[in-house]
Image (spheres, rainbow, N blue to C red):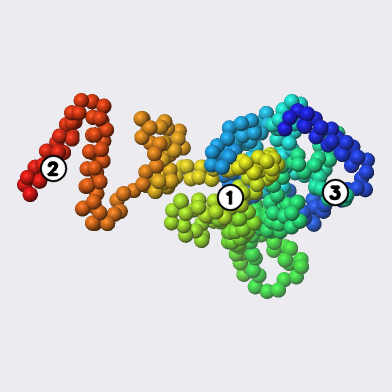
Amino acid sequence: MSIFTALRERRRQRIITKYLNSQGSALTVRPKSTWIPHWLRGDYTLKNSELIFAAVSRISNSLASMPIQLYQGSKPVYNGLNDLVAFSPNPLMTSSQFFRSMEACRGTAGNCYALKVYQPGDDVPRLELLDPTRVQPIIEKTSKELWWRIQPDEGPEMFVHDFYMIHVPFISTNGIAGISPVSVLFNTLKYSDNIQEFNVKQLEQGVNSAIVLEAPANLGKDQKAAMIEDFMSTYRETSGNILLLESGVTAKTLNLSPVDSMLFEVEKITRSKVAMVYNIPPHLLGDYSEANTASQEQVMLEFLTLTMLPIVRAYEQELDRKLLTATQRRSGLHWRFDMDAVLRADAATMAEVHYKAVRSGWMTPDEIRFSRNMPALPKGVGKWALVSQDLATLDYTVNDKPKVLMRGVNEEGSGDSSGGSGGQTQSQSQTQTETEGGNGGA
């Protein structure tokens, strides 16, 4: 985008924004993604819900650990646009911090937003992270185009066209506004909090603080009060060490457990529901009751396939749609996250993958060394694709393969001596002698 095109686009946006601000009736405000009012939803955020924090941090950290790269076909492209997304989307954030924050907003509010801000003379914008609670989708009645209403911390509200907004929803029923997973889990989290508060009260009362007094006969109101007062007086005077009970009165304690057995069941159910809403395997949130995976590779494969793949694809398509023009997309430009980076810590798995890649010929040794930040092999021997030759018919191995190898040796020797005086190399002489000796023996 040239500077003149950018200036014309900014002028057009200012004119449309001014018109929309003055013609409020021309806007249709989309309903919020949840019917629960904000004052009833509770404050189940990353700060006071350990399960939501665990789920969101698991997903956001996994996304942030995947390097993102601009490609043209299968070839990496290094330009200003790639430097923006893969290194520093704005002056305050690295790429890892940016995508971690975007996913944290998406996992709590149901939406994440980043505004494209162009500076005069720059073809590449910067991406400013927005508070999802201050952004609302609207539809212009005449053109049916999507706009966004932004209420900043200070100043009047703004209207921004969808072209300038990077938006990835959690899941949506109208294709625009995402549904907050926290609102979906409201009842589950509230019930879990009530159970925990009840157990805390039991713990504060003490394990054996409740005492039952049994009398041999029915007592009147005054007699009951006198018996309790006499018991408590003796209890306080002796610090609970000596109790004198008269007239057949017996005392029994109620042994209260500091932790109700139902608490563990409630926590298990809560973990299962949080994992279900965030589409995470339960054992990645600490519920190992039904974990049957045999290796770390299977655990990460399940997590990458069921959880991360749809999220990564949503970010890739949104970046392709908002940061690339139609001409660039038709030329083969596209964004891609390296999901294999999540398996980088599993040395055994990566070694097996690289071993099969070399033997199957779809990766060269130099490509594998480059992925591990190692230099290429000397003399260019690692730039060629290799293929396994350990599978062949018995007839070829015994009868044909020696002839093929011998022909290669002879041709190489002839090529080396073609520019000289016609003399043979030592290996050629030895090969010819062995051949002649073999013929003579025959």
The percent coordinates of residue 143 (x first, y second) are: 85, 48
Give the labeled residue for mark 2: 435
Q: Which residue type does callout 3 highlight?
A: Ser
Give the labeled residue for mark 1: 308
Q: Going 40% across and 36% down the picture, which residue do you hit?
A: 383
Circle 2 packing at 10 Å, graded few (<14), some (14-19), many (20+), is few
Circle 1 packing at 10 Å, graded few (<14), some (14-19), many (20+), is many
Q: Which residue type does callout 1 highlight?
A: Met
N-terminal-most mark, 3 or 2 = 3
Q: In the image as oriented, which residue stretches furthest toward the bottom? A: 217
Camera-side mark, 2 or 1: 2
Q: Is residue 339 left or right of residue 89?
A: left
The percent coordinates of residue 79 (x first, y second) are: 61, 31
Q: CA distance from mark 2 to mark 1?
A: 63 Å
Circle 3 packing at 10 Å, graded few (<14), some (14-19), many (20+), is few
Q: Is residue 300 above or below residue 255?
A: above
Mark 1 element type: helix
Q: Going 51% across and 57% down the picture, which residue do you hit?
A: 288
Q: Is residue 394 left or right of residue 283?
A: left
Camera-side mark, 3 or 2: 2
Asked if residue 381 can be seen in this view, the reply is yes
For the N terminus, the quadrant is top right
The percent coordinates of residue 388 (x first, y second) are: 34, 48
Mark 2 element type: helix
Q: CA distance from mark 3 to mark 2?
A: 87 Å
The percent coordinates of residue 415 (x first, y second) are: 27, 33
Give the labeled residue for mark 3: 143
Q: Is residue 84 above or below residue 400?
A: above
Q: Which residue type does callout 2 highlight?
A: Thr
Residue 78 sits in quarter:
top right
N-terminal-most mark, 2 or 1 = 1
Mark 3 element type: loop
